[in-house]
Image (cartoon, grey):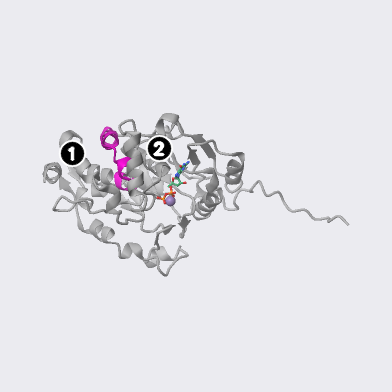
Amino acid sequence: DTPTHQYPSTTVLEPPLFRNTTNVELQKAALVALVRNKELQGMRSTVRQLEDRFNWQYHYPYIFLNDEEFTEEFKEGIRSITNAPVYFGKLPEEHWGLSPYVTEEKVKEALEYNRDRYIYGGSYSYRLMCRYQSGFIHKHPLLKDLDYYWRIEPDVHYFCDINYDPFKYMRDNNLKYGFTITPLEKPETVKTLWETTRKWILENPKLIPEKSFIHWVVNEKSQYTNCHFWSNFEIVDLSFYRSEAYESYFQYLDRAGGFFYERWGDAPVHSMAASILLRKEQLHWFEDIGYHHPGYSHCPNKPEMAARCVCGGGSDYMYRSLCNRRYGEVGNIYQDQVLQLAEM
Ligand code: GDP
Ligand code: MN
């Protein structure tokens, strides 16, 4: 006997029941991921959580970027799990590759030397990724008309309902950079990052703003604190990455070679830039956005925030984090003090 029942189609989702398309003022903003085809399931997991926790009310577009062509399987797999607009883009060739300022021979040596010294120590593609996310992602043609991006990754978790629009929150409060978690960077990976940054400051004093939050990343003795915003989550006003000062800083770092000879991550690079070029009032800890990326979790402990979350035990990292404490304690300093710090 042939069965008489049939499963409904699994490729098309109905719009959510409570889809709210009235009176929602959208920003020019998108959720953006650099991702590989093999990470489809992890990406679907992230997207589904973002839809359920936040985006079902807004339908902000997703933009997926890849150094290779996305497969039909990847595109279908993503489209079948959200009804927000989705864009898939390949990176311009000139944005993904070895910096013109380093030599292949020396890069080889550096990878060999660092292979067992830290995670991704011997990985060439990881370095391409970090250089791309530091200097190029905001230049991708698909991001051209955006004012804000929210960076997302496969296999992260969003623990809490987000019942407002973080992009609008950024705009309403004149915020430039938003984060959730502030770990310590492994010093081995950024040995000369501050040395290089300090030279850039001294050579470009005109690009340093009147007030700066630099003391979060550089202590009173002019040493890097190793504090950084974990950039696998970041909500950013893209005019910051598009600014003359940021571009000058990235170019200077690229020339120094540390993306390859060391393993400068886009997280410490973004964090140095944000702390030096922005004021404390332009940065924001999204404490209410409970979040997990392999390695660390943040679960809000304030009752009014926690009420909207499903998380708990072992997720109190940010309430113990040295960098988060420092974030609360230090304030802005003036441009001449920044220059003094760079000279020390
Ligand atoms: P980690 O978070 O530092 O451990 O690094 P990940 O492996 O999560 O990489 C960071 C982001 O870049 C993730 O969204 C990855 O999917 C993406 N990514 C890393 N390497 C590549 C690559 O070679 N090609 C592409 N297209 N994406 C990459
Ligand atoms: Mn990751």
The residue tagged 1 is 199
Q: How many marks?
A: 2
Task: Give the left or right position of residue 123, taking residue 77 as reference.
Answer: left
Q: Position of residue 237 (x, y in %)?
A: 35, 41
Q: Nearer the viewer, residue 243 or 118?
A: 118
Q: Position of residue 128 (x, y in %)?
A: 39, 39
Question: Does residue 144 sit above or below 24 in this rendering?
Answer: above
Asked whether residue 251 is drawn in magenta, I would say yes
Residue occupying the far bottom of the picture: 313
Give SS at disc 1: helix
Asked whether residue 129 is drawn in magenta, I would say no
At a point 83% along the width and 56% down the height, the residue shown is 3
At a point 43% along the width and 35% down the height, the residue shown is 143
| Magenta residue span | 244-269
Q: Position of residue 69 (x, y in %)?
A: 54, 35
- From where the camera sits, is residue 171 visible? no
Give SS at disc 2: helix
Q: Which mark is residue 8?
A: none
At a point 43% along the width and 52% down the height, the residue shown is 164
Q: Position of residue 110 (x, y in %)?
A: 32, 43
Q: Nearer the viewer, residue 27 or 219?
A: 219
Q: State which quarter of the image contains the N terminus.
A: bottom right
Q: Nearer the viewer, residue 99 or 162?
A: 99
**Dot 2, how many residues are within 10 Å of its Cα: few (below 14), some (14-19), or many (20+)?**
many
The residue tagged 2 is 137
Type of amino acid under label 2: Ile
